[in-house]
Amino acid sequence: MILYKNDFFAIIEKNSDVFINVERFGFDIRDFNEILELNPRVVLTGFLTLKRALEGESKGEIKIGKLRPEIEVILAKDEMTCKVRVNYSLEHICENQKEVVTDILMTLNKEGIKEGVISEVINGEIPPFEEFIVAKGLFPINGEDAKLKYFELSERKPQLRKDGSTNYYDLNLIDVVYKGDWLGEKIPPTDGKDGITVTGKKLVAKRGRDKLLRYDTKTVSAHEEDGKYVLKALVDGAVVFKNGKIGVENHLIIGGDVDYSIGNIDFDGFVTIHGTVKDGFSVTAKHDISILSNMGIGATGKISSTQGSIFIKGGVNGKFTTEIEAKKNVYIKYCNETKITAGGKIDIGYYSIDSDLKAEKIIVDKRIGRLIGGDIRAESKIITGAIGNKFERKTNVSIDGFDRVSVKKEFEEILKKYKSLIIDAEDLKADLEIYDLNFSFNEDKNLFTDYSKQVEKYDELIEEIAQLDERRLVLQEILRSRGEGQVSISEGAYPKTYLKLKRIVKKIDTLVKGTFYINGKDLFFDEE
């Protein structure tokens, strides 16, 4: 079929290939573009071949290109989109709209494009000689991962009021639950929605990842309710997280006072006392102790938590008899003539008078807090409103201090190990989820043994991670101190206050407020 002819040559199409037959020489090749514009379906593939033919170096019918189809289909490599190029003039498209649409649909069907055809595009304005999308596939939508939700433990610190003061009356140290109470839940993963390419190939969606509900099977049970798994307490007690599992520990509740009717308490769990502890009586517990009477306590024996914290809502008048000791923290409204030792911090609401305090850090309310008399000793930090009083009561305040370089090095080593163990735990957790999803332990005892060993290993990892994280937080708090130990006084330190930071002793002779801190062998002071 002759596509074009002039006095110099004829352009011929055979089986979609384009040839030139030159009859007369002398045609300027620069004018050939005008011919291509008149025949937009022609694609020139041999420029040099055309040049030689026009110059008479080649004779006969010479292949110079190919003829575009009337409707071109351009399929993306991933087969998620399909474009069309309509090689008709705008005039032809406008005059033969229905026929062109029919041609497009027939061509798409011939090329196997059978999904996601956008009819409003095809039936709209069709641009000539331009590619435009006529079909889109559907990408698969993966299922949602399982969602876990656990009982949230109360924040273990006094709450700040809007006016800046501290509320020591509503510290919730122990979270009490009763048999049947909600402790957590899991919404299972969902199936995904499969996708499809424009050629009809199915794209399988992934099911969401499952997650393990971790709980102590002796004190917590799991039930399927309304399409989700719900954790409930099997016993009354205090909520704890141990080895990454939620559980319920023993909780002794004393509705009144600890007196002759109760006797001394030595309990392997949590203790809540709604009354007071009478003079001479002692309370020892493995975990947290809360004494909730507004009266506080007097000249008791020893109040001791071997693994947890102690909260005394009403304060202490110890008469140089009471001794309070906690592995973690002590929260107290005030204390008179009392010895308090904490592995973490001592947090005092109002004042300490003639008491011996020892902790990693000691915090007294910045606005109204007072440290008057006694020996106050911390490892890294003491923050208070005032030290001593206008009657110049002798008060000893000391900071043991720390080696910042050593603490920072330990912190970085722990952080590195912590991150490494987290990765190991995640990998092991993924393995356990595969066991849960794909195997029946009833049919294979060896498989169950392997699974149990993996669970035990995972529990050990979680315990180690928890211990590292606890130490990491302690070191992080130490590193927040000024220098290598600080004493901050927001209201004023009175004369006869003796400050000792490491080996440096500073006697206060006039009222002063600000922050004393030590760095190396030098003592610094920032005045407020």
Image (spheres, grey):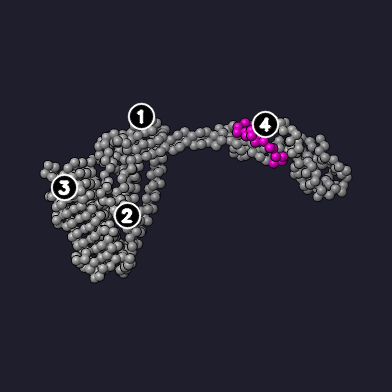
- Of circles 3 and 4, the one toward us is 3
Residue matched to label 2? 163
In magenta segment, residue 160: no
Disc 4 versus disc 2: nearer the observer = 2
Q: How far is mark 2 from mark 1, CA to CA? A: 62 Å
Rounded to the nearest angstrom, the CA distance separating label 3 from label 2 is: 32 Å
Q: Residue furthest left?
A: 260
How many discs mark residues in the rendered view? 4
Circles 2 and 1, Cβ within 8 Å, touching? The answer is no
Q: Which residue is mark 4?
A: 105
Q: In front: 72, or 175? A: 175
Q: Is residue 417 left or right of residue 28?
A: left
Range shown magenta: 104-130
Quick one: 442 or 386, which is closer to the camera?
Answer: 386
Q: Which residue is under mark 1? A: 442
**Label 4 vs label 2: CA separation?**
74 Å
The three-letter code of the residue at mark 1 reads Asn
- Which mark is in front, 2 or 1? 2
Labels 4 and 2 touching (C-beta < 8 A):
no
Judged from this view, the residue extending furthest toward the top is 443
The CA distance from mark 4 to mark 1 is 57 Å
Mark 4 vs mark 1: which is more N-terminal? 4
Image height of 507 relative to 5, above or below: below
Whether label 4 touches label 1, CB < 8 Å: no
Residue with the mark numbered 3: 277
